[in-house]
Image (spheres, rainbow, N blue to C red):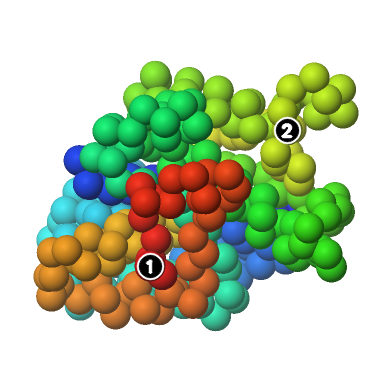
Amino acid sequence: MHLAYLDDSRQQGAVAIFGALVIPHGEFGWAERMHSIAIEQLFPIDEIEERFREFHAYELFKGEGAFKGIPQDKRFNAIRVLLMAVHDHKLPFIYGAVDEKKLSNSVAAQGLFGTAHPLSAAFKLCLLGVEKWAQAQHLQRPEVITVDYKDQYLFIADDTKEQELKKQLQSDYRRLRSARPYVWQKPHRLYHSHDAMYFGDSTQSVGIQLADLCAYLLLRHLLKRDYPIKDGSDEFYEMFAGQVICAKPEPEWSQHSELLVTHDS
């Protein structure tokens, strides 16, 4: 069973991203070990439980929140260690991203995605991207869908206090993954997904924290194409750029590629 940890990052009015860090079977222990090394560089061991109450990648990068007062060199070195887990173990980071302004102005795109909410649209793209990745692990003929349960995956999303958004994401998942796929009464596009999606606390989840970090750094990379800023984040993005996969499902990609944001455009 592959684990696909989900988190989002957003510059309101510009770009909305939903990304999934996929940790294949047998790789979680290594990722957790690298995470432990990074956290031990930031906090004294006897203070970790008290101070590490919440995790936001932007706070680690900027030195805010739980990471306020920690020197930049220590914070940036911790980021490097975390990203080594993604790079060294070739963990895929699969994402969907939309241009918020273009989505809001396109009735046709809203009809196809079933929503005008940019995070909801990016979420659907991301899920379909993970499915395409899972199929690619075993398919010999890309034009034929072959289900191989060794490539099943479980979605674990960062929990949110925005209850309406949470309900929307749960509904989005169910539209793509029927509760009873073998009845074939509803469209079913997530052939290798688990029967349910779960939400987790980022403070307790190594995978969600890594997904948060990757999504945040990818967002900065995409925004810098229009607003160049020298802040050191380019180095971090390059550490996992080789594992970044943009979701381009059909028919969404063919019909509305102009409003989907990609790192490889």
Residues at marks 2 and 1 touching, judged by CB atoms closer than 8 Å: no
Element class at badge 2: loop
Q: Is residue 207 visible?
A: no
- Residue 163: percent from left, percent from top: 39, 20
Q: Select label 2 or label 1 by which is in front.
A: 1
What residue is shown at x 72% (from left), y 28% (from top)? 187
**Amino acid type of disc 2?**
His
Going 28% across and 66% down the picture, which residue do you hit?
Answer: 221
Total tally of numbered discs in the picture: 2
Q: Is residue 21 above or below residue 171?
A: below
Residue count near mark 2 (Cα–Cα under 10 Å), binned few <14, some 14–19, many ≥20:
some
Q: Position of residue 111 (x, y in %)?
A: 46, 26
Q: Which badge, 2 or 1, comes first in the chain's sequence?
A: 2
In this rendered view, identify the residue nearer to me: 26 or 40: 26
Residue at the spot of label 2: 188
Rendered image: mark on residue 118: none
For residue 188, side relative to residue 3 (left or right): right
Q: CA distance from mark 2 to mark 1?
A: 29 Å
Secondary structure beneath dot 1 equals loop
* x and y, in percent, of residue 105 in the image: 27, 33
Query: Which amino acid lies under the numbered mark 1 shown in the image of this protein?
Result: Ser
Could you tell me residue 108's position as x and y percent?
42, 31
* Quadrant of the drawing holding the C terminus: bottom left
Task: Tell me the residue that label 1 is attached to.
Answer: 265
Estimate how packed mark 1 is, as few (under 14), some (14 to 19) or many (20 or more) residues with alpha carbons within 10 Å.
few
Q: Is residue 68 left or right of residue 28?
A: left
The answer to which image quadrant residue 92 occupies is: bottom right
Residue 165 visible at all: yes
The image quadrant that residue 216 belongs to is bottom left
In terms of depth relative to the viewer, which is nearer, 44 or 212? 212
* Residue visible at 22% across and 46% down in the picture: 14
